[in-house]
Image (tube, rainbow, N blue to C red):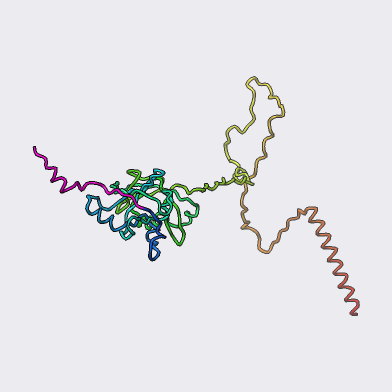
Amino acid sequence: MFQFNGFNMMFPDHSRPFNTTYKCYSVSMLPGNERQDVENGGKIIMPPSALDQLTRLNVVYPMLFKITNGSINRSTHAGVLEFVADEGKIYMPYWMMHNLALDQGDIVEIESVSIPVATYSKFQPQSVEFLDITNPKAVLENCLRNFACLTTGDLIAIKYNNTTYELSVLETKPGPAVTIIECDMNVEFAPPVGYTEPERKEREEEPMTIDPTELMPEPTGFVAFKGEGTRLDGKKKKDNGTNDAPAAQRQTYVRGIPDYDHPYGLLRFDRSVRKTDQLESKLEDSKFQEFQGEGFNLKKNRK
């Protein structure tokens, strides 16, 4: 079988991945107006030559890249937003430079990659203030539209109501790096850093002031084991003083019944007067006599 090496030289292999190095700068160094859309997302800006080279290669869309800081062997993943950077430079969000421990003008390696679609991710807020958001999942979903990838171990930043919140990516499935472009992803939140569970105070039961048994009427009719016990040998039971005296039986309250045969015009008075009632009656009689005396004297003065 003949091999045409010249034919292979004329048509090189286009399956080679995109792999090159650039100087990295934060978005604030990008010439022109301030680009908050880049700062609040997870995409980078590359030079036009990168687009020309990518179109010549057999890259998978959407274009995703692995960014590596070779000096500390730390990497993350990002998408591309535009190809308008100066040649030899790329611009990325500040939080991404912070994750890679990069300074302005440091050299980074850019490599095109293909990563799986996300199905699950878990985040941990870095401040308790994140709990003040009414619907954190809806806020996160809206902010992640500016992202293309998630990498386990990254510390991403989202902005909501003029406040920047940092979230640590604790876990991603089905791999340590996933793409979140047009996907259905389950999201969970871990307790924020510095969050402590509130102490649950057990409710103390208030002691009952009235015994419910006192409110129940005494049983009527046959009551089992109500009498005193007797010995089988006929001897009297010794009283050692330990047995308590039988409790006094409470009388069942009976509602009064009117006397329908009471004669008309007859008044009856209860003659059982207590000592206190007698004393009060004597005081009232003395006052009444004194009042009568004063009235009598007034009548004398009038004569």
Q: Is 235 in front, or is 18?
A: 18
Q: Where's residue 185, x and y in %?
A: 33, 50
The N terminus is located in which quarter? top left
Judge whether residue 5 is colored magenta.
Answer: yes
Q: Quadrant of residue 80?
A: bottom left
Give the percent coordinates (x, y) of residue 75: 37, 46
Task: Identify the residue at horizontal 30%, vertical 53% (top origin).
Answer: 181
Q: Residue furthest top?
A: 233
Q: How many marks?
A: 0
268, 288: nearer the viewer: 288
Residue lying at the far front in this picture: please name it. Answer: 6
Residue occupying the far bottom of the picture? 303
Q: Residue at x 63, y 58 (%)?
A: 261
Q: Report the magenta residues as a range.
A: 1-22
Residue 234: image location, x then y, percent: 66, 21
Q: Quadrant of residue 248?
A: top right
Position of 16 with respect to 153 (left or right) is: left
